[in-house]
Image: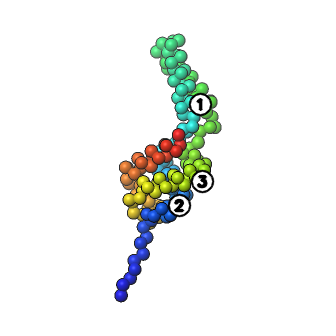
Amino acid sequence: MFWKVKDTTKSSEASLRVEDAMKLLSDVWNAEQMKAAFKNVKQSLLVTGAMMVLGAMVMGPPGLAAGGGVGGFLSFWMSRGKFKSVPQILKELSPAKKEKLRRQVRDIVRNLEWTDTAQLTKKVMANKAVQKQLLKLIIDYAI
């Protein structure tokens, strides 16, 4: 008598749901203890840098430090309430962008064998190369 063994691995496109992909990306990001606020980082960097340069031109080396402090405070004040964490950014993506992101996540984790998202997350956390690919993907979407 032959018994058919059910394959429980989830490696097909349909098995990685959008919600699972978003949760995996959030978990990877949070595991690195990084919070994102990419939409205004460039502006904040520019303001802080400009204040440092201005301070250095007016007061020399002490002005560099003073300008950095003033620029940092200005950047904080200008960006108050505008920053979002990566998980929040991922939640607010359009359904089309989420689906595209899900396909890219699926392609990255394609070679991992897993039966549920908890197991997939554990395997990803144990694989620095996969984590690096997923972090790059997150950054590409969050910036």
The residue type indicated by label 2 comes to Arg
Please tell me which of labels 3 and 2 falls first in the chain: 2
Quadrant occupied by the N terminus: bottom left
Q: Which residue is mark 2?
A: 17
State the CA–CA distance, disc 3 to disc 2.
Answer: 12 Å
Q: Residues within 10 Å of mark 3 (few under 14, many from 20)?
A: few
Q: Which residue is mark 3?
A: 95
The residue type indicated by label 1 comes to Phe
Q: Position of residue 141 (x, y in %)?
A: 52, 44
Please tell me which of labels 3 and 1 falls first in the chain: 1
Q: Residues within 10 Å of mark 1 (few under 14, many from 20)?
A: some
Color style of the picture: rainbow
State the CA–CA distance, disc 3 to disc 1.
Answer: 32 Å
User: Residue drawn 62% across and 30% down?
Assistant: 78
Disc 3 versus disc 1: nearer the observer = 3
Q: Nearer the viewer, residue 96 or 31?
A: 96
Is 75 drawn above or below residue 18 in the view shown? above
Q: Which residue is mark 1?
A: 76
Asked if one can make out residue 127 in the rendered structure from this viewpoint, the answer is yes
The residue type indicated by label 3 comes to Pro
Tag 1 near tag 2, CB within 8 Å: no
Q: Which mark is residue 99?
A: none
Q: Nearer the viewer, residue 111 or 83?
A: 111
Disc 1 versus disc 2: nearer the observer = 2
User: Residue drawn 60% across and 26% down?
Assistant: 74
User: Residue drawn 61% across and 33% down?
Assistant: 79
Q: Residues within 10 Å of mark 2 (few under 14, many from 20)?
A: some
Is disc 1 placed on a helix, strand or loop? helix
State the CA–CA distance, disc 1 to disc 2.
Answer: 37 Å
